[in-house]
Image (cartoon, coloured by chain):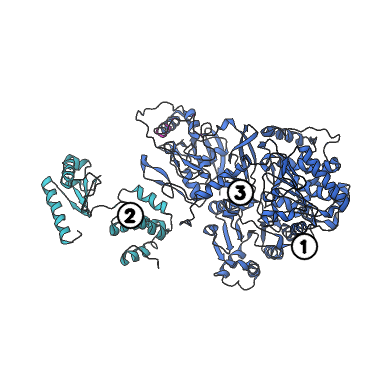
Chain colours: A cyan, B blue
Amino acid sequence: MNTQPTLFSPALAARFDKLVTLYPIKRSALVPMLLYAQDEVGYLSDAVIAEVAERIGVSELEVRNVISYYSLLRTRPLGKYHVQVCTNISCMLRGGNEILEHCKKKLGIPSKGVTADGLFSLEEVECIGACCWAPAAQVNYDFHENLTPDSVDEVLADYRAKAGNGEKK
Amino acid sequence: MADVTLTVDGKKFTTPAGTLLIEACRAHGIEVPAFCYYPGLSLQAACRMCVVRIEKMPKLQTACTTTVAEGMIVTTESPEIAQARKATIEMLLGNHPLDCPVCDAGGECELQDMTFKYGAHESKFVEIKQHRDEQQWSPVVFFDRPRCILCYRCVRVCGEGMDVWALGVQNRGVGSVIAPNRQDHLDCEECGMCIDICPVGALTSGAYRYKTRPWEMSHVGTICAHCGDGCKTTLGVRRSSDGMEIVRGDNRDKSGINGDFLCIKGRYAFDFANREDRLTQPLIRQAGADLRSVSWDEAIEFAGLKLREIRDSKGGSAIGVIGSNRTTNEEAYLLQKFARTVLATNNIDHHRTADYPAYASALSGKSEASLRDVGSARAILLLGNDPTEQHPGLAWQIRTNVRLNGARLYVANHRLIRLRRQATAFLQIRESNYAALISFLGGASPPAGAQNAAAFRNAVRKEESLLIVFGSEFCGRDIEALLKFGSTLPSVKFACLGDYANSRGAADMGLYPDLLPGYVPVSAAAHFTEEYSAGLPTQPGLDIMQMLDAAERGELDALYVVGANPVARYRRNGTALRDTFLIVQDMFMTETAQVADVILPAANLYEKAGTVTNTFGDLQLVKKAADRAGVRTDFELIVRLAAAIGADVKKLVPFGPRGVHADFGQARGAQSGEADRHGVWLSAHHLEPRLSPFDPFAIFDEIQRLVPAYDVPRLDLLTGNDQHLRSELVQIEKPVSRPDLVLPSNDTLFTSGSLGLYSKTLHSVLEARQPVETAAD
């Protein structure tokens, strides 16, 4: 359907071709398309924005408007593993702030920072819906619960090892 | 829809179901304040100012999104509501700087008005206001972020109204900010609608900012001097060292045929009038010498005597006259009368931008559309032209009609014009196939290369009422064929697009070698002869090309050029005109003026009173707004020239019975607003001053007598309402159509080839625009 050169993998491009046909107005496909694009590319680069705008048939400005509204959509690259530490009320009461501080010290970066090797990025986030097992953190799409500074070290070490093996998750 | 009855503030009224509560209130004289609500744009409900109490509803409701319902009982003002609005304003003022004394909007700011009304001058907020520096987004658009109250009017008018989508909202909550489409600057039509519609001073105009305060200007409603749409504009004028200077063009009076709209030219390109290098002194050239400044008397006498000498020795046929697309109807009419009765010649023409005589002839028995009709037609067929660039007012009306009324638009063009985005169907044809298109619509086989042509034709022919708008791609017999096709449909109106502010008027007023005012052939001038009590030449004269050719051959002894630049327009070699006695009446030292023997500095359309006719045949009043020392109106110059030639001025301009020299304010700059009210009163009592030979309304009487189409209600016209010509009254024999003489100017939004050349603002915008194409189209 779309014969233009694309930034995305053939599977994702095919998915997008279908996605725009699923809604009464194409514009409705904008947010899912941005999320999928972000998962594949890592962030929403100018080129991604241009292609999404083209596929949806809106201006780049409009795509940027939507991206700027949602904190889950990012226009800058993150680390390979994006560590999101919750400090919302349940986690806070059970030591979420300490976990965050520990991560900062361990990784040597502030919230929203990326490590020099590009392996980790850190972000303080609002509730991730894991209150029962607070304090909790989310790394990419995986949850890590009932954290203590020690278990955080283990989790981070696991990811570092995975990265050494060339695995993504 | 059925009507519903509701009670607002104890006042019971009936209104159609589906009406928004805020509109229903306003229609019945109850003002509900709102920042974000704007008639004709999508609903936002962002500002919470229009909250009202509706009985049996738990909370205050926004009047801008609530539709009226049967038996609804509404309170729009109460202590509770005032408190809610006051709180809203307090929030809005949280970061809003209190720089009203220097803000452009101060004095005409909706936030300021509301703050006064609800007394929200004290605040519970003690936080320091967040300041952001102002940003320049384009040569004409500046953004002052802290002043913005996030009503999103600008975003909506740019997207929905203009279909440009150059503005957006980024981030959310308190961090929300209006953003331009190119990160830090705008790439758009620069129409300034966002500035006009901004309720505060967040968006300001580069042409106006920090120049004056609203109350220091006089505001004069007149007609834009640029394209053929005839948009109403309000000029803010202020006294300057050499007259009245135009400081601002805007559209505060939304009663005109343009509704809310003004384009870049109407809003900013008035600055040609303020230019330093305008001609302000008469100049003459004697015996091959350089031009030198002389007094008015000397210049006019010099020109008059020379014209008289040529007329008396060689006859009128040795003199040519070229009229203008930018003078008023009265001036165009007077010029042809002057040429025919004083100079005794039919050698008169103007730069034709549409084949109006062919149109007038083909129109007989059919009806013509006003620009207002475009805003309400059920279906529109647009053939040729690119209104977005050449007729922005028309494009606005089309878009508005499609958006608000669901009108169906059919576009056939050889280019992919922007309006195809609003079109129900778009047919791309080859540039040479416009004639074939008409026969195709009439039933012949489709023009080569056109796709989906059959569906297009079927849809068009199914319309029960249709408005056909066509550009200058159609001339002569094509116009006839098109109108003939149109008359096979049930109910059709037509509009013919020409280029300049008064191109239509110039045509209607007989600036033709073979046609008198009202398209009467020169050979059938009986009642003109009677009215003028003078013999008229009955042989058609030379057209503009023939005049220029004759002049270059040295066979034309004199040429009188009023508000035109034929040397540049027709790419002639100016020096070839040296054997012709050339009188040029203009604002600037044009290519034609450079080779003239006499130059008379003329006033422009913003500096005179009279009437103009837009290309749709809407007749409108032009009021004097600006003034420049050292210039005179074309009307006055023609009369003075006639006097110098020795003509009886009272025969030329039938002013007052005793010929008293006085006027009622035309000479008093912006105060003419006052004089016009006086004029209205006089006309209401069937009295007219007509005291001066320079009073254009003295000649307007005669126009109304001789040109039946112009016989519109006078009082309505004088009060500033557009009046559609009675084009059904045009009596015209089949004219000699000269498509070869029609030279469309093909202007863009930012150029106009004549006045636009002298606008600094247009130049600055053109320079700032990058040569890249907009991706969003």
- Front label number (2 vs 3): 3
In the image, what residue type sits under mark 3?
A: Leu
Identify the residue at the far left of this view: A150
Q: Are marks 2 and 3 in contact (CB under 8 Å)?
A: no
Q: Which residue is mark 1?
A: B736
Q: Is-magenta flag for residue B374? A: no
Tell me which corner region of the image, top left, top right, bottom left or bottom right, holds residue B178: top left
User: Which sits in the foreground, B341 or B576?
Assistant: B576
Kindly tell me whether residue B692 is visible in this rendering: yes
Say which element carries label 3.
helix
- Residue B568 lies, in percent from the top left, at 67, 54
Chain of the residue where label 3 is placed in the rendered structure: B
Instruction: Please give left or right for residue B429 compared with residue B48 in the image.
Output: right
Q: Which disc number belongs to residue B669? A: none
- Please report the bounds of the magenta region as a residue range: B89-107
Instruction: Please give left or right for residue B509 compared with residue B746 in the image.
Output: right
State how far apart marks 1 and 2 are (Cα). 64 Å
Q: Which residue is mark 2?
A: A44
In the image, what residue type sits under mark 1?
A: Val
Q: Which residue is mark 3?
A: B757
- Residue B639 lies, in percent from the top left, at 80, 42
